[in-house]
Image (cartoon, helix red, strand yellow):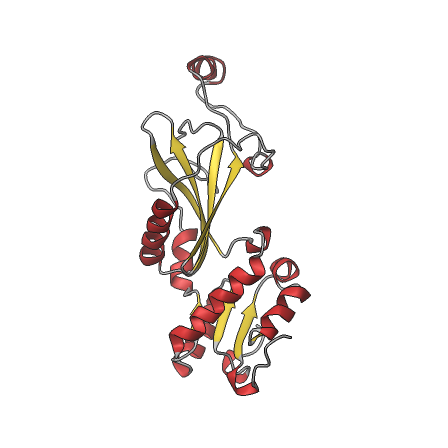
Amino acid sequence: MPEIVEENDLFRVGYALPTRKIDAFMVEPFISYARERGIVFIPVDVSKSLTNQGPYDCIIHKLYGAEWEHNLEKFAANNPNATIIDPPSAIQRLHNRLTKGLELDPPMVLQQFVDHGGIMFKVYVAGDYVKCVKRSSLPDLSNETMEKMVLDSGGVMSFSKISSAVIDDGSNENIEMPPPEFLDEVAKGLRTALGLHLFNFDMIRDNKKDGYLVVDINYFPGYEKLPCYESIMIDFFLNIKKSQA
């Protein structure tokens, strides 16, 4: 039988998320399982002040804008014991990818291409939890391809959409995963440097230098894509509750 949790022991998590995120993440089995473990998810009305809603022990969000940030700041000032996941200032650092001294028309991201065997490691982080999965990525560029690119297109070459190239078709099963201890250290370093609880990062292995590179970081990714994400996220919230005790 599920453990009965007293009303006073419930951990109340307010969520302010885009509709698409709610539909994918806040599904009924997850909400029910959370309730059994003493966690209640409460939708936030973003049109109203947070201080007039709740009570909340924790706020999770993936919304942006000055008005929302002011709402969170006011709530934090009036509820110092509540945890906000995560601070807007920390999230904003991931969005600030503007380049300086490049005569390019935004929006775009400029990165050096590194041969990495057509494999990307996507690492999910939820507090202390770290999970790595393999995905197909962009193919390596041979010297012949590079030379042809320069001759035929002036150094510009189009790739297929990365989003359509990251589906794991099973062809990379023999590719060695990065050591778990290494991933834990990288995740810990990023958590500290970024000041974030929920994020994932893409990592590739440089074929020439035999080292790893972090090529992208995203806030509050699709944890629902992971097997058993329900228990992963509930343990995360229980750890937040424990840290407040």
Quick one: quadrant of the C terminus? bottom left
Q: Can you see residue 188? A: yes
Residue 33: image quadrant is bottom right
Residue at the right extreme, as displayed:
28
Residue at 55% x, 55% y: name it. Answer: 223
Looking at the image, residue 145 sits to the left or right of residue 186; the answer is right
In front of the other: 78 or 99:
78
Position in image of residue 31 (x %, y %): 63, 69
Position in image of residue 114 (x %, y %): 39, 29
In front of the other: 183 or 89:
183
Please tell me whether residue 231 is drawn above or below residue 222 in the rendered image.
below
Residue at 43% x, 29% y: name it. Answer: 116
Please tell me whether residue 36 is drawn above or below residue 154 in the rendered image.
below
Residue at the front extreme, as displayed:
1
Please tell me whether residue 86 is drawn above or below residue 3 in the rendered image.
above
Q: Can you see residue 43? A: no
Residue at 68% x, 66% y: name it. Answer: 28
Please tell me whether residue 20 is drawn above or below residue 102 in the rendered image.
below
Residue 203: image quadrant is top left
Position in image of residue 179 (x %, y %): 38, 42
Q: How many marks?
A: 0
Position in image of residue 241 (x %, y %): 44, 74
Residue 21: image quadrant is bottom right
